[in-house]
Amino acid sequence: MAKTVLTNVRCFAVGLDLTSHSNKIELSSEVAVKDTTNYGGDGYKEVVGGLASSEIAGEGQWEAGDATLVDDAAWSQLGGEGPWSISANNSAAVGDLAYFTRAMRADYTLFAEVGEVAPWASSAKSSWPLVRGQFAHPPGTARTATGTGTALNVGALAAGQRLYAALHVLSASGTTPSLTARIESAPDGTFAAATTRATFTAATAAGGEVVRTDGTAITDAWWRIAWTISGTTPSFLFVGTLGIR
């Protein structure tokens, strides 16, 4: 990706698409520096890495009134954990770069001086690793029946590595709609021999979840999201991201 001016940052916070409600999104990651300086260091400090963490901070225009608006979502999520997925200047199409984690919405600030457009500001602190991966399902494609997503060559897992996956259910409609998404792997892109590696909790409304494999080595290099939908005239909009850490 070439140098870029930020004009279309995509940010999905649990079950909310923040893209049209935000004008500033920042993602930071750090490793704590622990001093191990000793007499054998020839006069130089020595350090090792401690605990790692990441944080998402955002600002934008305040709106309220239903679950698709920032105030309703931020208020209900405050103090709770869920998936956050972020990208820079793309449409969140399958294969586009994504950064994602499981994070706790830690604070929420709103309102300002008279005459100003009502603002909001909020941040979320990670409780799982930050993963650099890709989108596995786009936000603008409605799903009304059971199906499978695009095959992606993400790579095999060595022992100790995990495949992480985030699901953001942006909307659900119909009578008793239910969406059960899962992550599958296969030796090749045909998925003739697919294996389910992780399954999300059945979703009946907007929300989100992050899942991961157990750290066992997996030789399959191809991955995809698949889903089972039930109900009467069900329809779901959702986003999926996945990556290895």
Image (cartoon, rainbow, N blue to C red):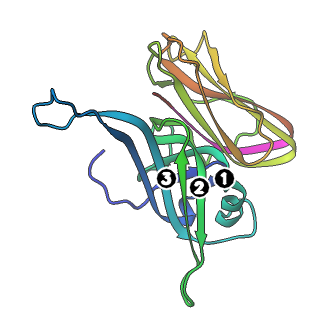
* Image x and y of residue 20, in percent: 56, 63
Q: Amino acid at mark 1?
A: Gly
Check if mark 3's residue and mark 1's residue have beta carbons within 8 Å: no
Q: In the picture provided, is 148 more to the left or to the right than 34?
A: right
Image: magenta residue range = 233-242
The residue beneath circle 1 is 79
The tag earlier along the polypeptide, 3 or 2, is 3
Q: Quadrant of residue 133?
A: top left
Residue 236 belongs to magenta span: yes
Mark 3–mark 1 distance (CA, rounded to whole Å): 14 Å
Q: CA distance from mark 3 to mark 2?
A: 10 Å
Number of the front mark, 3 or 1 = 1
Q: Position of residue 168 (x, y in %)?
A: 64, 44
Could you say whether the residue bearing mark 3 is in a helix, strand or loop? strand
For mark 3, does the 10 Å Cα neighbourhood hold few (<14), some (14 to 19), or many (20 or more) residues? many
Q: Relative to residue 6, is residue 206 depicted above or below?
A: above
Image point (64%, 45%), residue name: 81
- Label 2: how many Cα within 10 Å (few below 14, some 14–19, many 20+): some
Q: Residue 97: tell me if it is visible.
A: no
- Disc 3 marks a residue whose amino acid type is Ile
The secondary structure that dominates the magenta segment is strand
Pointer 3 or 1: first along the chain: 3
Q: Mark 2–mark 1 contact, CB under 8 Å?
A: yes
Magenta stretch holds residue 24: no
Q: In which quadrant will I find the N terminus?
A: top left
Q: Read off the residue under disc 2.
A: 106
Q: Which residue is disc 3 drawn over?
A: 56
